[in-house]
Amino acid sequence: MAIYLARRLVQAVLILLGVSLVTFALLYLLPADPARQIAGRTASAAQVAGIRAQLGLDQPFPVQYARYLGRLVQGDLGRSYLQRSEVAELIRARLPASLLLMLAAILCELALGLTMGMLAAVRRGRSSDHALMVASFVTVSAPQFVVGLLLLYVFAVRLGWFPIGGYGTFAHLVLPALTLGILGAGWYARMMRSSMVDVLRQDYMRTARAKGLRRWTILARHALPNAILPVVAMIGIDIGLFMSGIVVVESVFGWPGIGQLAWQAIQRVDLPVIMGVTLVSAVAIVLGNLLADLVAPFVDPRIKLQ
């Protein structure tokens, strides 16, 4: 286990180094000028050049990247150009909201997706199976803002069951979590159905049925633990994707997470904030995949970490 964790740690460092290099290079090549954004439209060329020199943006790419890595090793994500605050503090203030939304969304999509997938697998080839798979395809294809606005209109505007937006109570959490849950449930439903169908064809399932075990006992004790492994891997990926890919949902519902912080930084060309959010999202993806790998042996003891 120790050797495995050490190897994964080295891989994680290399991955994060690659992410930082690619992201920094792309931001360096952007035609937008952060110095001009800070100085304003009325600033003279000399003022813009002074700000650029003050921020070190006039240095060659290797120098800028080396300087950024040096600060990063010390845990310094830089300072926001426009908000005049440390990037780490800005992310730390927004992180709890994003983590709460991520957890609620994952629980929601698992409840919907696994239920749909199991029902479709049990009733394979029937009309209900086809209907569930069509529904999963629709949820996967639907744009985030369309689902979010539709839920807002129905449950917040028309019915008044939930607030239109904001943050702070369970009622504020329901609609954004349900939006992300509906969009992700389709993937889990299709994955669960495919895995469950394969498991139901195995010999030990026929043996369990021959012993006279109840249908739902067979599904819960024998089929589900073996069929859920691919889902565990998907959850690990989702942890990182939710951290970086909920920009639209947070904007629609006014949710103060790091997705909304990233969107504001992109609009204002606030490079340190963009880099900080990107690296935090990359760390979340790496940790999510590592967590999925560590949980897999508990789900299936036949899996050995090497």
Image (cartoon, rainbow, N blue to C red):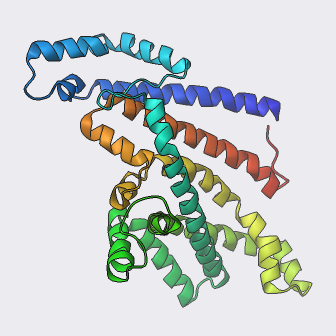
- Residue 165 in the image: x percent, y percent? 37, 63
- Residue 126 in the image: x percent, y percent? 58, 88
How many numbered tags mark residues here? Answer: 0
Q: Quadrant of the C terminus?
A: top right
In the displayed structure, would residue 112 be above or below residue 88?
A: below
Residue in view at x 8 percent, y 18 percent: 44
In the displayed structure, would residue 253 be above or below residue 247?
A: below
In the displayed structure, would residue 32 be above or below residue 117?
A: above
Write down the quadrant of residue 117 in the picture. bottom right
Residue in view at x 37 percent, y 61 percent: 253
In the displayed structure, would residue 199 be above or below residue 209?
A: above
Between residue 225 and residue 245, name the one nearer to us: 245
Q: Is residue 4 left or right of residue 125?
A: right
Residue in view at x 56 percent, y 42 percent: 285
- The outermost residue toward the front is 168
Between residue 182 and residue 254, name the one nearer to us: 254
Residue 264 visible: yes
Residue in view at x 67 percent, y 42 percent: 290
Q: Quadrant of the N terminus?
A: top right
Write down the quadrant of residue 47 in the picture. top left
- Residue 15 in the image: x percent, y percent? 55, 30
- The outermost residue toward the right is 211
Q: Is residue 138 left or right of residue 82?
A: right
Q: Is residue 98 left or right of residue 138?
A: right
- Residue 252 in the image: x percent, y percent? 34, 60
